[in-house]
Amino acid sequence: MLKNKSVIIWLLSGCALVFIMVVVGGITRLTNSGLSMTDWHLVTDTFPPMTETKWNIAFEEYKKFPEYQKINIHNDFSISDYKFIYFWEWFHRFIGRIIGLVFIIPFVYFLIKKRIDSATLKKCFVLLGMGALQGFFGWFMVKSGLVDNPDVSHYRLALHLTFAFLTFAYTLWVALDLIYPDKREVIVPLKKLARVTLVLLIIQIIYGGFVAGLNAGLVHNHWPLMSDRQFFHDSIALEKENWLLRFTEGKSGVQFVHRTMAYIVVGLIVSLYFKSKKYILTTQQHNGLKTLVILVFLQFTLGVFTLLYGVPLWLGLTHQVMAFFLLTAMTFTLHRLSK
């Protein structure tokens, strides 16, 4: 029988809500809905406009900003179109509010009832800070698309996306600490390799954010080579004036890093799996590693087809969701190899 079962359910519920928020965030990005709400108010934005008058006021406010003035004004963009993109951004923010309530209200209750031990309490305060920071990163990202450029900064998008993944992973880790409280002897070589793999996976997620923010998936829609049957396309060296910018701001360079890093992540996970064969593993460790291998090959395949088909909505979203599942398996496996 698990101790602190209610606390574990609370933490896993938070994981589920963060997952839903990332999915809706992916839809928001892929439908170009992220700049539809041009301001942020904690209470008054809780529900969308309820009357046509309020919808018209919101639409007129949206018309003052670059996305409408430079793009949508030329697309016969109507108020019904605006309502569609508004919904996804509103829903994304609404889930953020729900996450805040789901975290804070039970947290206060568990504090009063003294259901959280001191070690878990410290971790929960970290989670509280991460949640607040994630909300700030969201607005920080949106703000970058409301000044001159009708696109959000790909750096800020990657920051917002990656921090959501990290918040989820840490919440899951805290829950796993409670689910598996007993410590066992650690297999140090596997733990070290799993840590390296997690770091490379996070870097790959960051570059996934770069690809999304720069729409870099819309170029070089070929595999296994880039356009013109080149492994390292000539355009990489032409887009920006130095190599740092070519690999962080150039579409071709960013895509090259993301597609090349995919091979490295696959290689590390396969190496981790075969290296584990030398040791006697628990059921959880074995299942975690096996799941990792399955998911990384599924993710790699999804990435290839997402690229080949020019990032259709459903494939782009599925690729992002699979990254989430892969990080979940990686977090679980590292936890089981560490404690």
Image (cartoon, rainbow, N blue to C red):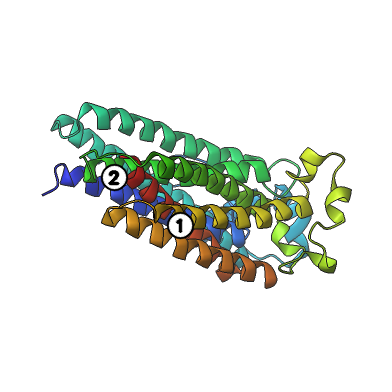
Residue shown at 63%/58% (left/top)?
32
Q: Which residue is mark 2?
A: 176
Q: Which image quadrant is residue 259 in?
A: bottom right
Residue at the outermost left position = 1
Vertically, is 299 above or below 116? below
Which residue: 41% across, 46% down? Answer: 168
The answer, for residue 206, to whether it is visible in the render is yes
In terms of depth relative to the viewer, which is nearer, 56 or 253? 253
Which circle marks residue 209 in the picture?
none
Q: Secondary structure at mark 2?
A: helix
The one nearer the camera, 145 or 186, is 186
* C-alpha gap between disc 2 and disc 1: 25 Å
Q: Residue at x 57, y 50 (%)?
A: 205
Quarter assignment of residue 335: top left
Q: In which quadrant is the C terminus drawn?
A: top left
**Which residue corresponds to the image point at 50% horizontal and 58% vertical from the top-left?**
270
Q: Position of residue 151 (x, y in %)?
A: 70, 49
What percent of the width, then of the height, locates residue 317?
A: 54, 64
Of the residues under marks 2 and 1, which one precedes in the sequence? Answer: 2
Residue 164 in view here = no
Give the side of residue 153 with respect to residue 245, left or right.
left
Answer yes or no: do the residues labelled 2 and 1 have beta carbons within 8 Å? no
* Type of the residue with mark 2: Leu
Residue 162 vertical position relative to residue 273 in the rendered view, above or below: above
Q: Considering the numbered disc 1 on the image, is that residue within a helix, a strand or a loop?
A: helix
> Label 1 amino acid?
Phe
User: Circle 1 is placed at which residue position?
Assistant: 274
In-front residue for pair 224/304:
224
Residue 76 in the image, given as x and y percentages of width and height = 73, 67
209 relative to 197 in the view: left or right: right
